[in-house]
Image (tube, helix red, strand yellow):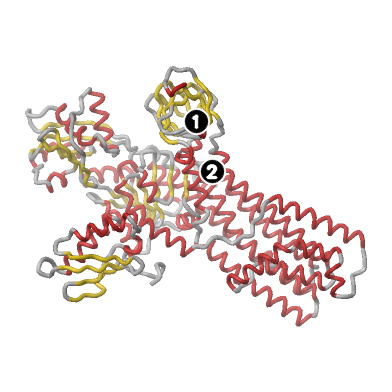
Amino acid sequence: MSILKSKRPLLKCYRAHEIKGRIRITSRALRYIGRGEECEHLLSHFKTLDGVRNVRINIPASSVVVNFDEAKTTSDNILAAVEEILAAHSLGILQREREERNRLLVQERDLHEEALSTLITRSAVSGTLLLGTWLAKKAVPATMFGRLTCFPGLGALALALPLFKSGIGAFKRSMLPNADTLSAMAVLSSVLSGKAASALTVLFLHDLAESMTVYTMNRTRNAIRDMLSVENETVWHPLNNKIGNPLQKIPAKDLSSGDIIVVHSGEKICADGVILSGRAVINQSSITGEFEPVSREAGGKVFAGTLVVDGTITCEVKSAGENTTVSKIIKMVEDAGSKKALVQNYADKFSTALVPLNIGLAALVYAVTKDMNRALNMLIIDYSCGIKLSTAAALSAAINTAARQGVLIKGSGVIESMSNADTLILDKTGTLTEGKPCVESVVPLTDKFTQSDIISYAAAAEETSKHPMAAAILAKAKHEGIAIPRHGDVNTIVGRGVFTNIGDAIIRVGNKKFLNECGIHTHPMREQASALFAKGENVVFVSKNAEIAGLVGIRDPLRENMKKALNRLRNIGVDDIVLLTGDLEQQADVVARRLGVDSYEYELLPEDKAKVVLRMQARGNKVVMVGDGINDAPALAYADVGIALGKTRTDVAMEASDITISGDNALMLPGIYGLSKYTMDVVRQNLFAAVGINTLGLVLGALGTIPVIFGAVMHNASTILVVANSMRILFYDMRRPPFLK
């Protein structure tokens, strides 16, 4: 069954066939299991199940066959276990399914796009031949052979060779003609009927329009690359890679991780890194979209493609070349061109399907009127180029406009989905809030534990975590001068907490549910926790062995402009705004009331957030999910549009999302929505113009009102018009309220 038609939940397992001691289980998820290591890893999990004798996975058939010992387990247990194991691989599965969906929905646009220099040269040659033909005013040869071999006719046929090649090639591939097929037929018919000037006119205008289109599209494609260009071919590097040694210039392309570089005022940073010494004011607009320069000092991160406005810094390179953030941005924007919107796909298919109509009209008009000029107009004036470019140019311009303003959109299909969205789901920590929490309260259970003890335990468990609340605890330890004790490996239970050991003691840090599941009673501190909740603080429970040790209260301020952003979204068509969080009800309620969201759900695991998304989609809602962390990844992947917001976002969230907002400006959320709406409006305008102008041309051509030359002008004018109209999107300012544009 086609992926586009299947209604089965992706991760659900089904009993396909069963006999004694053997069961075949099917699941759509199995077709997205990566071959090689991932498949072997999955098999190893299956084989560890109690009672399982052997397992065989058939990825093309999306099935797994399990032979088991009926004395030790049941088929129901096997089914449940397989479903649970697949759920653990959900993120990779979701991503691959989405990629396949894109490939099925969208096929790459088949535009015959030649080099600009080639098109200009051909335009010049055809224009010169056309002028010479008009000036010569020679009689048209009477014979067919003479018309084909005369200088104008031979020149027209030679110039039309690329059209013949493209038109015949399309027919061979799909048994369907394309726009180039029509143009080639028009040229050949004109030459055979003794109208070499008309053929040359068609070729001249065709190449001229293509030149303008290619020039415009190239500018659009290169805009983001030019903006993010590192520029520096060389970089200052201390001799022997030691700070304090004399500086020498080395090629920037030779940099690798661990190298030391020095960047002065007015120079661009050519690698991602960390500042070791110095202080500088840096313009990071190419990465974050924020034009206000920021101050960075020792310990701060810097990115390739950003400009040192003032100051001098010494940095250690972390990523260079294609591994830098700027290179990944460029690749993401360029890859977005292959992920087309449904409207673009439909436009391509519709325009291609209309080509046979032009051929039929030409035959019909000639049969009725016996007028070759009218028939030629039916061939020259077609919908294909105008309709295709009406979507492609607009959507490409939108992707590049967003990128210049710090928003990375992974495909034009995302723009269309975003424009239709009516429901917004928001994560709390790091999304609605700044993601820069700080410790407000430390409450030990008894005098047995001090505040320093509680912080040291929590810091040991959270030392390797990238979660914002972990950062707050570590910052508190550093500020208070509390040493982090030596500890063992840290284990993370997503959505619950972490645990490690300090000597023989097991330290657990997390939410109430986590400690309760570990058999540790939290009610001795029920009143203290309630008091912190009432103040709007997130409560982190800390235990030592089987005893609760204390609480840490953490406050995370709301992100600046978030309330304003949500109000703007309501004004432009978002009907339902929902808050999802793993926090307890009281924390969720405080934030929900402050921001005025429509509803909220709390104490959610990552899979719970994904289920909420699916539930809303089942009701017919078009869902946008905004998050920043690993726990948001499944929901981001399942949503119609997933958005990773803020500098604190994780790489996993970025991979799972469709849109990445590089900066922390919440107003970019309504900005994306506004850009999507605006772009789809331009697409509709383009389609109306392309269809309207070409239809008028066909009618006038059939009536004999316009000559062949005017028909060619009208057709190519529509192509140029839709490209020019699309270029307006390049000047769209996402920071302004959409309803004020």
Q: Residue at x 56, y 42 (%)?
A: 225
- Whether residue 524 is visible: no
Whether tag 1 and tag 2 are in contact, CB under 8 A, the answer is no
Q: CA distance from mark 1 to mark 2?
A: 27 Å
Which residue is labeled 2 in the image?
733
Which residue is labeled 1 in the image?
269
In this rendering, the answer to whether 411 lies above or below 620 is: above
In this rendering, the answer to whether 364 lies above or below 54 is: below
Left or right: residue 433 versus residue 674 is left
Viewer-nearest of labels 1 and 2? 1
Left or right: residue 695 versus residue 102 is right
In this rendering, the answer to whether 406 lies above or below 294 is: below
Point out residue 475 in the picture as x, y percentages from the top left corner.
27, 29
Kindly identify the amino acid type of the residue bearing the numbered disc 2. Answer: Asp
Residue 313's quadrant in the figure? top left
Q: Residue at x 64, y 49 (%)?
A: 216
Viewport quadrant of the N terminus: bottom left
